[in-house]
Image: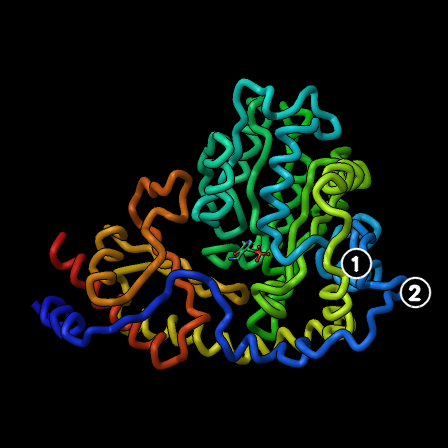
Amino acid sequence: MNAQRDYADLVQRGLTLDLTRGKPSPRQLDLSDDMLGLPTSYRTADGADGRNYGGLQGLPELRELFGPLLQVPAGQLVVGGNSSLTMMHDTIVHALLSPLPGAARRWVEEPETTFLCPVPGYDRHFTICERFGIKMVAVPMGADGPDMDVVERLVAADATVKGIWCVPKYSNPSGIVYSDETVRRLAAMPAAAPDFRIFWDNAYAVHHLTGDPAELADVLALAAEHGNPDRVFVYGSTSKVTLAGSGVAFFGSSPANVEWFLANTAKQSIGPDKINQLRHVEFLRDADGVAAHMRRHAELIWPKFELVDRVLTKELGGLARWTSPRGGYFISLEVPHAAEVVARAKAAGIALTPAGATHPYGTDPDDRVIRIAPTYPDLDELEQAITGLAVCVRLVAEERG
Ligand code: PMP
């Protein structure tokens, strides 16, 4: 009864709140305002004119700055445009059309191509696979990363398995961090396909929210150590460091893969936006500059994560489970009948990412996971949205018994 009354009150309030996408708030974007007046010079470190064509791999000074943060040697890092998702998408297009180092043939000639998708995961990864007809196989996630017994078995047994999506640090949406043992097993495991690749989307490499930053094992180095030097594609970007629409994106890998990647991108572009790259070097300066900037983000974001945790604890207690990440952009909430909870929230003016989006083909077989993106709304709106969401969880629990 209580929940029904609370829900009726909630609907009455006519809210319009949005917890769908992991966008930085305007105040976070303001932190990078000074960047808009940069660069003060269009000369690159080696004296070239940044306004002109060329420099396909990206400025060495920016690669030196981000190499250590993404655990990729600067010489093996490529700076692209403003989106790492574009680089992931294009890597797959290139692998479809041009054989990867070690491949027997192009992926487009394979009778079937399969990617492992740890779940819950990032919906846009799954959309790329769907677009190209790549079969997706869900693998459960634990507290240390994907279930490695399952991953090892599938990768060793099935030569159609060409890839696995990984968001190894402050994962989207659960916020978990892969343990050293998980990273080692991924780097070392035998693979049936000679061109099997790990898509290591380290989107939240520097996005710590507490004074206790997570450490990630060096997957590129470990893969090389275990005789699989070409296994890993690393991605990252400054979309959630500087400006979400005007950042710089990175691809890193073995020398052979980088050569393959650049040979393909050379057909797409005469060179990247080096003015934006210079702007980033001048603004962020060095690793300390990045860390200081990320602390300013954390000051704005951490209270939002705390608030979600506090409200869920107070309102839901034992009715649901949720993660309490120490970094990144998302919280994963697990409730019974997630789709219905999301529908009830929508009817009350609270927009959530569709239930199932965290799984391949948009289907969560257990109908449990709801992704919460707390960064964009201000604290007051967020409190209303999470309190309202909790009402919907209680309502559905009461109705379904
Ligand atoms: N990967 C993950 C895991 C993300 O969460 C996001 C943003 N939501 C992206 C990639 C997108 O990155 P970019 O802006 O560099 O395309």
- Amino acid marked by disc 1: Arg
Q: Is residue 17 above or below residue 148?
A: below
> Could one spot residue 121 in this view of the protein?
no
Quadrant in the rendering for residue 309: bottom left
Which residue position holds label 1?
63
Q: In the current view of this chain or complex, which residue is farthest to the front?
A: 52
Please indicate whether residue 303 sits to the left or right of residue 384 in the image.
Answer: right
Tell me where residue 104 appears, x and y as whole percent. 69, 20
Q: Quadrant of residue 65?
A: bottom right
Residue 310 higher or lower than 395, as above or below = below
Compared across the picture, whether 97 is left or right of 123 comes to right
Q: Nearer the viewer, mark 1 or mark 2?
A: 2
Vertical arrangement, residue 76 with respect to residue 13, above or below: above
| Amino acid on which the number 2 mark rests in the picture | Gly
Residue under label 2: 47
Q: Ligand 1 sits in which quadrant?
A: bottom right
